[in-house]
């Protein structure tokens, strides 16, 4: 499904090729609206925003949404599933720089030079909504609220990457694992799921790559947390039993632990 670009055509002309009868869920009916749709929009603004959204067919595990160097065309909102965002390293490997879950936006990396600087790969079958940038740009000119929210979103993403660099550069391996798990817990809870019981969509290898650790270190530390009854780990299933202790291990006091966990969400 492709949105035709017609110079300075109106928003409704731009989205004519979208067959709205095939859209099963509108933004207003979607349970993730408050997470991925900019806050504070009026009904008319949401209606116009909804017209520009393209509901994509699901992409399967291992498939790529976009690659480094691809032309930037759109933002993407994750409806279900998850993706990892990574770059190629000089030695031919990959460095994971973040994970994206339901209700989160990705694709902002293409704004700078109109080419994606990262590659986004599905960790599991993932459904997304595509937000063509030419339509978002037009809406930003018409609605200052949307423009302000997108600026705030970009600011939060910059802060999150800075927080990740701090964690990787200043914290021990055990602190990194604890903070990572707390981040996932908070993000699951924000989406209406259990923050204490969840499945990891990423492998031990991916977690190790992201945290700058060896896969063996990740497995060993998860095993230690399991043995100390701080959490239960069974394959990719995690159940947190002692969240306060996990905060302590992560170097966070109980009065600021939520903020610390949030800052590591990538």
Image: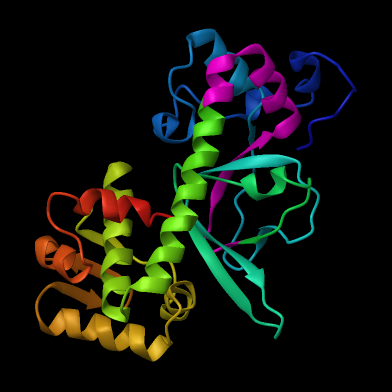
Q: Nearer the viewer, residue 27 or 38?
A: 38
In the rendered image, the vertical position of residue 59 relative to residue 102, given as above or below: below
Q: Residue at x 72, y 45 (%)?
A: 112
Give me the residue at 38% from left, 67% from top: 167
Residue 23: image location, x then y, percent: 60, 29
Q: Residue at x 17, y 74 (%)?
A: 232
> Magenta includes 227?
no
User: Can you say whether 192 is above or below 207 in the image?
Assistant: above
> Would residue 154 be visible to someone looking at this image?
yes
Q: Is residue 58 above or below residue 49?
A: below
Determine which quarter of the picture holds residue 174: bottom left
Nearer the observer, 247 or 50: 247
Residue 66, image x, y percentages? 70, 56
Image quarter of residue 141 = top right
Q: Is residue 133 magenta?
A: yes
Left-right relation of 75 to 265:
right
Q: Looking at the image, which is closer to me, 3 or 216?
A: 216
Res 26 visible = no
Q: Quadrant of residue 213?
A: bottom left
User: Picture coordinates of residue 246 (x, y %)?
Assistant: 17, 67
Q: Quadrant of the C terminus?
A: bottom left
In-image side of 144 versus 35 (left or right): right
Q: Specify start and end residues of the magenta stretch as a single range.
A: 121-148
Does 229 sit above or below residue 66? below
Q: Nearer the viewer, residue 18 or 109?
A: 109
User: Taking 58 as reference, is 227 left or right?
Assistant: left
Residue at image location 25% in from the left, 69% down from the top: 178
Q: Residue furthest right?
A: 7
């Amino acid at each position: 499904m492709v949105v035709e670009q017609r110079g300075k055509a109106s928003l409704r002309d731009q989205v004519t090729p979208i067959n709205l009868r095939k859209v099963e869920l509108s933004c207003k009916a979607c349970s993730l609206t408050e997470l991925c749709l900019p806050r504070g929009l009026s009904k008319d603004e949401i209606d116009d925003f909804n017209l520009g959204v393209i509901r994509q067919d699901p992409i399967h595990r291992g498939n790529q949404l976009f690659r480094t160097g691809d032309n930037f065309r759109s933002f993407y909102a994750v409806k279900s599933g998850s993706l990892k965002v990574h770059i190629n390293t000089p030695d031919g490997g990959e460095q994971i720089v973040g994970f994206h879950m339901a209700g989160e936006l990705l694709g902002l990396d293409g704004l700078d030079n109109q080419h994606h600087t990262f590659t986004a790969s599905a960790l599991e079958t993932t459904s997304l909504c595509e937000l063509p940038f030419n339509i978002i740009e037009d809406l930003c000119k018409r609605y200052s609220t949307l423009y302000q929210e997108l600026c705030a979103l970009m600011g939060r993403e910059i802060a999150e990457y800075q927080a990740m660099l701090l964690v990787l550069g200043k914290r021990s391996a055990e602190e990194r694992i604890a903070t990572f798990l707390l981040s996932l817990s908070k993000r699951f809870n924000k989406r209406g799921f259990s923050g204490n019981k969840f499945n990891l969509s990423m492998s031990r290898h991916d977690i190790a790559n992201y945290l700058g650790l060896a896969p063996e270190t990740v497995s060993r530390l998860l095993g230690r947390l399991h043995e100390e009854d701080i959490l239960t780990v069974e394959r990719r299933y995690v159940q947190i039993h002692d969240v306060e202790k996990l905060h302590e291990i992560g170097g966070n006091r109980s009065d600021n632990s939520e903020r610390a966990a949030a800052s590591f969400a990538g």
